[in-house]
Amino acid sequence: MGDNEILSRIGDLVDEEHELRTRLTAGEVTSEEEHARIRELEVALDQCWDLLRQRRARRGAGENPDDAKVRPAGEVENYRQ
């Protein structure tokens, strides 16, 4: 997956998040359903951003960005900032 594909995926996930919030306001989903899906979206977004950062770091180090891999959710979610 290239940088543009990752950025497109990030855009799709953000759009889904906005759509979900709209559906919650309209009463089409429960807050529990919304919270559960938002959590899934947040994890997917974190994985996408991590992959994009890996690719950029590899490119900056003169390495092949295509060697970057999606890391497991547990790993990405437990980073310390």
Image (cartoon, rainbow, N blue to C red):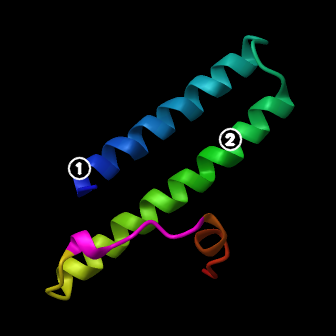
Q: Residue at x 48, y 31 (%)?
A: 15
Q: Do the residues under discs 1 and 2 have CB atoms within 8 angstroms?
A: no
Q: Is residue 58 left or right of residue 80?
A: left
Magenta portion: prevailing SS class: loop
Q: Residue at x 79, y 30 (%)?
A: 33
Q: Is residue 61 left or right of residue 51?
A: left
Indicate the secondary structure of the residue bearing disc 1.
Answer: helix
Answer with mark 1 or mark 2, whichever residue precedes in sequence: 1
Q: Residue at x 58, y 34 (%)?
A: 17
Pick the front one: 52 or 65: 65
Residue placed under numbered mark 1 in the picture: 4
Q: Mark 1: which amino acid?
A: Asn
User: From the viewer's perspective, is residue 33 above or below residue 49?
Assistant: above
Q: Residues within 10 Å of mark 1 (few under 14, many from 20)?
A: few
Q: Mark 2: which amino acid?
A: Ile
Asked where in the image residue 51 lies, by quadrant, the reply is bottom left
Residue 27 picture location, percent across and down: 79, 12
Pick the front one: 64 or 10: 64
Residue 34 picture location, percent across and down: 75, 32
Q: What is the spatial separation of the Cα atoms under label 1 and label 2, in whole angstroms?
A: 23 Å
Residue 4 lies in magenta, yes or no? no
Asked where in the image residue 79 lies, by quadrant, the reply is bottom right
Q: Which range is magenta?
A: 65-72
Q: Which mark is residue 38?
A: 2
Residue 26 picture location, percent across and down: 73, 11
Indicate the secondary structure of the residue bearing disc 2.
Answer: helix
User: From the viewer's perspective, is residue 46 above or below residue 55?
Assistant: above
